[in-house]
Image: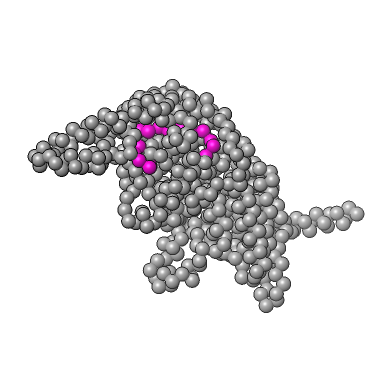
Amino acid sequence: MAEKQSEAVINLRSMRERSRLGGGLKAQEAIRVSGRGTARDRISMLLDEGSFIEIDAFITHRTTDHGMFMHHTLGDGVVAGHGTINGRRIYCFSQDFSVHGGSMGEMHAKKIAKIVEMADKAKTPIIGMWDGGGQRAQDGVNGLAGTGELLDRIVQCSGRIPIISLVLGPVVGVSALAASLADFTILGEEHGQLFLSSPIETPEVISGEVDAAGLGGANLHASRSGIACQIASDEEDACMLASEILSYLPDNCMSDAPFEQTADPITRLNTNLETLVPDNPNKPYDMVKVIEEVVDDGIFVELFDAYAENIVIGFARLNGMPIGIVGNQPKVLAGCLDIDASIKAARFIRTCDAFNIPLVTFEDVPGFLPGVVQEWGGIIRHGAKLLFAYAEATVPKLTLITRKAYGGAYLAMSCKHLQSDYNVAWPTAELAVMGAEGAVNVIHRREINAVEEEHKEEVRLRLVAEYKDKFGDPYVAARNGWLDDVIEPEESRMRLCRALNIIKSKREWSPPKKHGNIPL
């Protein structure tokens, strides 16, 4: 009996070693030479040392068509299991490019689907590391069935547990769809690529108009498609970025986001804000600097910084509590809202709302961007997404108006009328249907035209001043209860921290429904 047991243990160890070899030493070494890590290298970078517990190491594909012979590699091209990041439990998987090019067959997909389902049941985050050449042709429709099951599992747990994708190699076809279903997708700068259609089948690549990187590289997805929330300089950096984002997120939608003690006092005054924002309302400034001045320790993790740069989103903390920040960026398009900015902010707002992260809005918006391109592109529908996301969110919502808040854009940016909880403005803020100059040109057009030419400018300036006195200062809104207070700029941090501290226990009830119908 002891002999039989010993033989079984030796056999087990041999099979484990085969599983660790993936597609073989030669294939793994070729991956390392190319500057990429193997699946197990990447998991070691991501997780705390010695914490990884592997699951389904012995799974193999089920292809039996001898005309499409494939080696039965243990693990079937993906390493999956659970471990910890800074002591925090997560599930993870990593595609193994050394096995059939990381392609996704039936069992490969089912293995990832199983891990996603286990993460959902355990109510813990999941991080996927993607590096594969799309669906495996040898598995035929069986492979599509397994992939469909995986996509369903990801969709079902979306909004229940945080999902982060690291794209560290070329990811093609439905695998690209699966990777981009994550809450946050990080691409490696050199090797991370996403394609729905293979580059070798894309006419523009075939004709030489663009290369693979131009079609689906990291910089393209960060600046043009808006899929990449961050770009990692290398694979270790990608793991660090994922860990940093995760530090602001709870384990699941029923948990509170992790609190982190800070030595930055609530009462710290923001004296620098007096000079950061110009007196001239038409001069640009950097809203990121305003945000960094207000939040704990000046730490602001900006997301999608190369996409729709006229709006700023990201994570920070106030008095140790994680917050999601949305801010207009006056130095790009004067901070106007356009199609891309509306989509970018709306998705982030819904992500924060799903995971109980309070929202803080830094507002300086002159309106929606005018023009044929915007109107034909559907700015009405896309702008409505932003408004819908703010109105639908039930987390604590705080808004600070630094300068302009005009028209429909004022309403869309978490105004009091959309049930924002705490709205304040600096004394120089302007809340109106439009800028005073534009309003006067509309309201008093006939009066100005009736005046002699040499006096027109004098009359126009007088009317502008009258309009500003009547509608253009924050006290008009404050008198109507649409602002909770008008504050000095140096008090911004103190006021936001104190407001968040009292409304952090906010709970909202609404009549039951399946879900709202956001204008997608």
Seen in the image, is 501 located left or right of residue 109? Answer: left
Find the residue positioned furthest to the bottom: 67
Seen in the image, is 3 located left or right of residue 65? Answer: right
Q: Is residue 4 magenta?
A: no
Instruction: Tell me, yes or no, if residue 47 can be seen here.
Output: no
Give whichever of 473, 45 is nearer the camera.
Answer: 473
Find the residue positioned furthest to the right: 1
Instruction: Work out which quarter of the rendered image holds the N terminus and state it.
Output: bottom right
Q: Residue at x 79, y 58 (%)?
A: 11
Answer above or below: position of 25 versus 346: below
Instruction: Tell me, yes or no, if residue 419 can be seen here.
Output: yes
Q: Range of the magenta residues?
A: 393-409
Q: Residue at x 46, y 29 (%)?
A: 422
Q: Is residue 407 magenta?
A: yes
Q: Return the x and y of residue 467 as percentages of the image width and height.
A: 25, 33
Q: How many marks?
A: 0
Q: Return the x and y of residue 41 as percentages of the image width and height.
A: 59, 52
Q: Residue at x 65, y 69 (%)?
A: 141
Q: Return the x and y of residue 10 as percentages of the image width and height.
A: 79, 56
Seen in the image, is 327 located left or right of residue 13? Answer: left
Give whichever of 40, 239 is nearer the camera.
Answer: 239
